[in-house]
Amino acid sequence: MVKGSISKIAGPVITADGMKGSQMYEVVRVGDERLIGEIIELEENRAVIQVYEETVGMKPGGVVEGSGAALSVELGPGLLRMIYDGIQRPLEKIKEQTGDFIERGVDVPSLSRTEKWSFTPVVKKGDKVESGDILGEVPETEVIRHKVMVPPGVSGEVLSVAKSGDYTIEEMIVTLKTESGKTEISMLQKWPVRIGRPYKEKLDPTVPLLSGQRIFDTFFPLAKGGTAAIPGPFGAGKTVSQHQLAKWADADVIVYVGCGERGNEMTEVLEEFPNLEDPKTGKPLMERTVLIANTSNMPVAARDASIYTGATIAEYYRDMGYNVALMADSTSRWAEAMREISGRLEEMPGEEGYPAYLASRLAEFYERAGRVTALGSDGREGSLTMIGAVSPPGGDFSEPVTQNTLRITKVFWALDASLADRRHFPSINWLRSYSLYMDAVEPWWSDEISSMWRELRDKSMALLQKESELKEIVQLVGEDALPDRERLVLEAARMIREDFLQQNAFHEIDTYCSPKKQFEMLNLMIEFYNRADDAVSRNIPAKDITDLATIGEIARLKFVPEDEFEAKIVEIKKALNEEIRSLVDKYVER
């Protein structure tokens, strides 16, 4: 191993001499406490290293020892239910050793070497296997079966396979005859975090990632394997939105990366997630979740790595054929970590001090999303959906991180502080947000729900746009000066805003809304508008229409349980017909 010595220290960035023979992104151990670091720049025999732990007290002359390997994560049974820091150190295991504070230089394996897992083989002696083929299964949790795969780059004939039984992750379970000789495979894999795991083919995203949140699913849908950004100022609801997505999204596995978030927010996540009930299975949500916690007071270099750690773990479960959703909260803090390290390296700064490679790093991260055909002979499909929160200072969407994220992601859920101030949640601004997956997911909605979905969604957006234009006129002349037809537009848009787009994350019924219920609710609102518009054309005053009792019933529809809403809609439609008929009798036929 290469050994050098510290010559310069600048916060988390140190310079070491005598490092000839090292490689970029190689992991090194620094100083007497053997702190973890990573080489980020090489020049002749000098290496610049970012240290993933606090460097206070370190001095020149300390030993730097190379490992010969890049920063990697351990992949295998035991990832789910775990809480890691940015470089995959298990925080609960560290707490058992060091107490409430992480001591420098602590070295705890990411996955337990002593815990035994019940392995069931699915191959037998003489089988030919290739990279990605499934060798056996392990019931990792009550809801996820872990599939033990042939590592990428390995193929051959099975010489021996372990019997069904309990094994640790390091025990050999399969021996292959390969071109280079014999290869023994255990349940443990290691993979460098900065390199995306390979797959056979990337497929078009065509199936929506349903979250039960009406503004996400119906108005600005995200496809499985897609990318989305949630930018917004402090207090606008980014974290709660991501919690809702993590809890309700129809993904098999959730990877939640708290990247540089405030300690109290991350504490809330760590306390809440283990107690959340998975609506699919009735089991704790942690049974299919991996949490990566890297708070704002943790070393900045580990924050830079945390995003890649999360992406690699997510890709691993994608390769098993699962639909995975990765929540990154927030990529702005990751970019700030890049900016700080870039400054220590004395690199030429780009816009607002961020490094010139900010855009390419963001693109590199989001490009790891996708719906793919995984390696292996069975042609299984998996997907990795990435949802990144962005925290622009002062809610300024023109700043570099937000702008570069928007160039890459295909869904933009723009949080609005003025909506949050009015207690309208989710505070997604429907006039600034967009989704480029509308055409891709339309066939799914047409086949599974109704062919009218796109038409209703577009008509609703048109009403909201018209309302925005009319509000400017109302501010000048007052609502009473508007013609009846335009007053009706304001009422219909208000219904869509308050009774459809607004959703209570803490209400036991309204917290989740099925696609069928979403469609029926919107269909009823548009039907009300069409009936009312027809009535106004027959000289029935708009005021009488806006006073109908049915409007209140429509408003309460979102609090009706899933198993009762269809009967309730039939009841409301019947009442609406009767009320409209009575108005016609009163004004038209007298």
Image: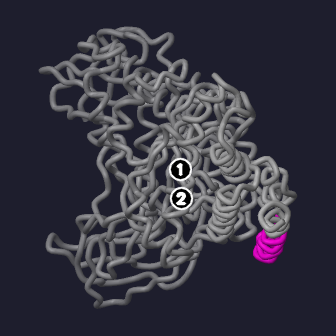
Question: What residue is at 73 percent from the left and 31 percent from the top?
Answer: 422
Residue 218 makes an appearance in the image: yes
Which amino acid is tagged 2? Arg
Residue 70 numbered mark, or none = none
Which amino acid is tagged 1? Met
Residue 243 makes an appearance in the image: no
Separation of marks 1 and 2 at Cα, in angstroms: 6 Å
Task: Answer left or right for 80 relative to 57.
Answer: right
Q: Which residues are magenta?
A: 560-578
Residue 461 numbered mark, or none = 1
Q: Which residue is mark 2?
A: 457
Question: What residue is at 32 percent from the left and 38 percent from the top?
Answer: 407
Task: Answer left or right for 111 relative to 123.
Answer: right
Query: Depth check: 14 or 68 in front?
Result: 14
Is residue 257 in the magenta section?
Answer: no
Point out residue 124 in the picture as x, y percentages from the top left corner.
37, 89
By secondary structure, the bulk of the magenta-drawn segment is best described as helix
Question: What residue is at 39 percent from the left and 83 percent from the top?
Answer: 161
